């Protein structure tokens, strides 16, 4: 299990794309000898809204979930 936490200056926001990109990097490039393919790897990404910052516009809805298909 790996946890990825974006640490930035208090006034800076970490882009969702940056977090997703870090989460989707492969942990292993070893090929499964039975299938000749890489094993699938998955990532769960949970967003934390910046409710302490002024926000213009409507609600964004629930956090999106992404999975890497290998």
Image: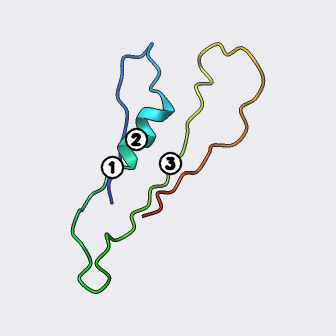
In the image, taking residue 35 as reference, residue 43 lies left or right, namely right
| On screen, residue 7 above or below 2 | above
Q: Secondary structure at mark 3?
A: loop
* Tag 3 residue: 45
Residue 3 spot, x, y in % from top left: 35, 49
Residue 38 spot, x, y in % from top left: 31, 69
In the image, taking residue 40 as reference, residue 63 lies left or right, namely right
Q: Residue furthest right?
A: 58
The residue nearer to you, when weighing 37 against 39, is 37
Q: Are marks 2 and 1 in contact (CB under 8 Å)?
A: yes
* Tag 2 residue: 21
Of mark 3 and mark 2, the one earlier in the sequence is: 2
- In which quadrant will I find the C terminus? bottom left
Few, some or many C-alpha atoms within 10 Å of disc 1 (few <14, some 14-19, many ≥20)? Answer: few
The answer to which image quadrant residue 1 occupies is bottom left
How many angstroms separate mark 3 from mark 1 (CA)? Answer: 13 Å
| On screen, residue 20 above or below 57 | below
* Mark sitting on residue 25: 1
Few, some or many C-alpha atoms within 10 Å of disc 3 (few <14, some 14-19, many ≥20)? Answer: some
Residue 34 spot, x, y in % from top left: 28, 86
Q: Secondary structure at mark 2?
A: helix
Task: Give me the residue at 36% from left, 17% from top.
Answer: 9
Q: Residue furthest front?
A: 36
């Amino acid at each position: 299990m790996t946890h990825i936490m974006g640490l930035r200056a208090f006034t800076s926001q970490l882009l969702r794309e940056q977090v997703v990109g870090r989460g989707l990097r492969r942990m292993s490039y070893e090929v499964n000898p039975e299938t000749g393919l890489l094993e699938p790897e998955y990532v769960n990404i949970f967003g934390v809204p910046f409710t302490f910052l002024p926000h213009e516009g409507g609600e964004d809805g629930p956090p999106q979930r992404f999975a890497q298909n290998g």
